[in-house]
Image (cartoon, rainbow, N blue to C red):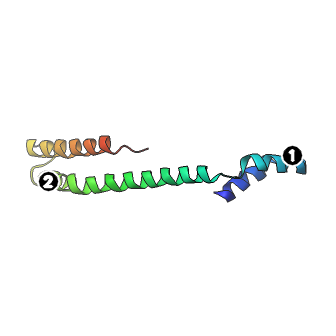
Amino acid sequence: MQNTQKNMADNCTKGLEEQDVVQLCAQCIPLTSEAILKQAKLIQHEAALSAARSHAYQAETDGLALKYLAAQAQYGECHEYTVSAKTRWLSAREAIQARYPKS
């Protein structure tokens, strides 16, 4: 992250005097520990949300997806069993997506 900020500062400072560069870098490069902590908490929250979503998909929809695929193989795409299985599977996926939205 600091390298990215340094590169951004390097790109922004082309053609500036040295004292202007020092002043600009003092304003934009250093991150406070509070900002770093806030960013770390956000990353941790997103990771936990992703893990919960993945677990919910495995627990609640994998079996429905397999039932849909089995019905499709046995009866074909347009049969009522296949359509019903697909509807149940997609409804379960939508419920999980509503519970664990992507950021």
Regarding residue 78, the answer to whether it shows in the image is no
Say which amino acid is labelled 2. Answer: Lys
Q: Is residue 31 left or right of residue 57?
A: right
Question: Which residue, given by chain and number where applicable, does mark 2 sit on?
Answer: 67
Q: Is residue 49 left or right of residue 80?
A: right
Q: Is residue 37 left or right of residue 78?
A: right
Reading the chain from its start, which is encountered first: label 1 or label 2? Answer: 1
Tell me the quadrant of the picture where the C terminus can be found: top left
Please identify, in this view, whether the residue under mark 1 or under mark 2 is nearer the observer: 1
Measured as percent of width and height from the top left, residue 91 is found at 21, 41
Say which amino acid is labelled 1. Answer: Asp
Q: Residues within 10 Å of mark 1 (few under 14, many from 20)?
A: few
Measured as percent of width and height from the top left, residue 70 is found at 13, 55
Decide which of 45, 89 is in the foreground and name it: 45
Regarding residue 87, the answer to whether it shows in the image is yes
Disc number placed over residue 20 in the picture, else none: 1
Q: Label 1, secondary structure: give it.
A: helix
Measured as percent of width and height from the top left, residue 72 is found at 15, 51
Measured as percent of width and height from the top left, residue 58 is found at 25, 57
Give me the residue at 10% from left, 43% from top.
Answer: 79
Q: Farthest front residue?
A: 34
Q: CA distance from mark 1 to mark 2?
A: 66 Å
